[in-house]
Amino acid sequence: MKSRKVVSLICIVSFTIATFAQNTQPIYPVKRVENPDMWRTDGWNAVDMAKKTKIRKKAKNVILFIGDGMGISTLTAARIFEGQMRGESGEENRLSFEEFPFSALSKTYQVNQQTADSAPTMSSIITGIKTDEGIISVDQNVRFADYTSVAGNETKTLLEYAEDAGKSTGVVSTARLTHATPAACFSHTAGRDWESDADILKGSKTAYDAKFPDIARQLLEFKYGNGLEVALGGGRSKFLPKESADPEYPTRNGERLDKRDLPREWQTKYKNSSYVWNKEQFDRVDVKKTDHLLGLFEPSHMKYEHDRLKNTSEEPSLAEMATKSVDLLSRNKKGYVLMVEAGRIDHAHHDGNAYRALRDTVALSDAVRAVVKKVNLDETLIIVTADHSHTLFIQGYPARGNNILGLTRGVGELGELDKEDSTDINQKPYTTLGYANGPGARKNERPSLKNEQVIDPDYKQESNIPFSAETHGGEDVAIFAIGPNAHLIRGSMEQNWIFYVMADALRLGRK
Ligand SMILES: [Zn+2]
């Protein structure tokens, strides 16, 4: 009953939105004219645009954007959030990549996981082979934490194929460069946590004693072509020896036990190379004179976008890192493969903090927009997807333009905004966003929430089942594509098929 009533009311909402806008309640103006004619014209325009879509099949370059943990509810909430940041209603907004002509659903299960983690999901996107939990760019014959099973079971990554073909390659992430998503591009390992040799010692003494290469070392020892041209992100402590103080936080040290200073090795290994660890050095890099660029901007993950914006002189944004990478990589006449990850959408979700997850999703949208402006889409395939989802949900019957972070407030029978917030059976208000599980769960009664409290960037949304960290979600995620072979992103796809669409566009990887 309730939902039927709401459906019929939606029509009224669009007529009365102008009246709503004058209301002082938490409702936002719709800046375009919305009436039945607009919906009709808008729909025909969309069809006409779709009919004009060009189909191209061969790419010189591939740029893969990953929103780590960016499920479909995250996309919906982030587009509303972005529109509302501009003072709009929000629902009609589109994230940059939502304008791409092709999209599909991606099935994210892996060989032994119904709901998967980033290690096998990114391995399947970047190597074309689904695999098991916790292992990186190796197949299902590898046993977790057994280094002896790695040799011979490595699965070749798109970046490795590209390097073999003389192309340039790059990896960008706001997480540690040794974290699962970027690591899957250049390393092969039986433990996603084996980021430094100190981590290996914690996980497997036998692997440590055998000097099995940790993920940071594998970045330096990349065997294909002339090595990665670009690696930008966090994770400095994984690259520095424990004898060395961190350059930004002198009271902290690196964590490597083998005394190797990998940033220094990067500079000696590659001619015309540079290593930067702050924004000022990053800005000074001349991409025309630099062939190999390593940037490590934090000992661990880089900052959330919300926190980075408090002092933009410390770290580059995802958009700045992505565009600089494109400038450097596109000097190669044979083309390039670049992976760009918004790595911390996932972390904010795990923390039960929707605000930071949405803000980082908008930062990804900004990065995609900036890159699209730079590249030639006749020869560059761009794919935007997620490795897996999270349990974020969008609930209740909020009115059009209701603050996506706020308490839910609906529309009344006459289409006017309700005077009171919507409530549960105990007359307590609730937020539109919540999580199925996570740190926001209360043991006893639900609290009496206030709007100022729930729209605070630090607020942790309520959740149903108490967990110290919220979990991933198992439903499909979206894939968006533009450029050559983008038309092959369609329907319901196995996640690993993304690899074959990219490899086919570059004419790589087919035996
Ligand atoms: Zn996660």
Image (spheres, rainbow, N blue to C red):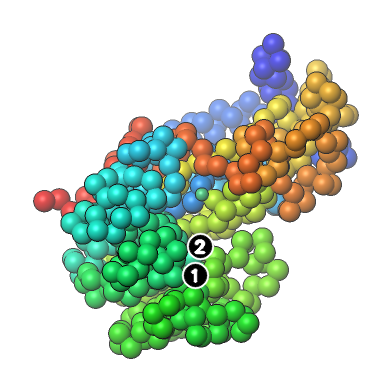
In the displayed structure, 69 sits above or below 239; it is: above
Of 414 and 166, nearer the camera is 166
Q: Residue at x 54, y 68 (%)?
A: 300
Q: Which residue is drawn at 32% across and 64% down?
A: 207
The mark found on residue 175 in the picture is: 2
Is residue 101 visible in the rendered structure shown here? no
Q: Which amino acid does label 1 sit on?
A: Gly
Is residue 391 visible in the rendered structure shown here? yes
Pinpoint residue 22: horizontal percent, then vertical percent: 85, 38
Question: Helix, strand or loop at disc 1?
Answer: loop
The reply to whether callout 2 and callout 1 are in contact (CB within 8 Å) is yes
Of 388 and 506, nearer the camera is 388
Pinpoint residue 503: horizontal percent, then vertical percent: 24, 52
What residue is shown with label 1?
Answer: 235
Q: Which residue is drawn at 49% across and 80% down?
A: 242
- Label 2 vs 1, first from the N-terminus: 2
Question: Helix, strand or loop at disc 2?
Answer: strand
In the displayed structure, 384 sits above or below 108; it is: below
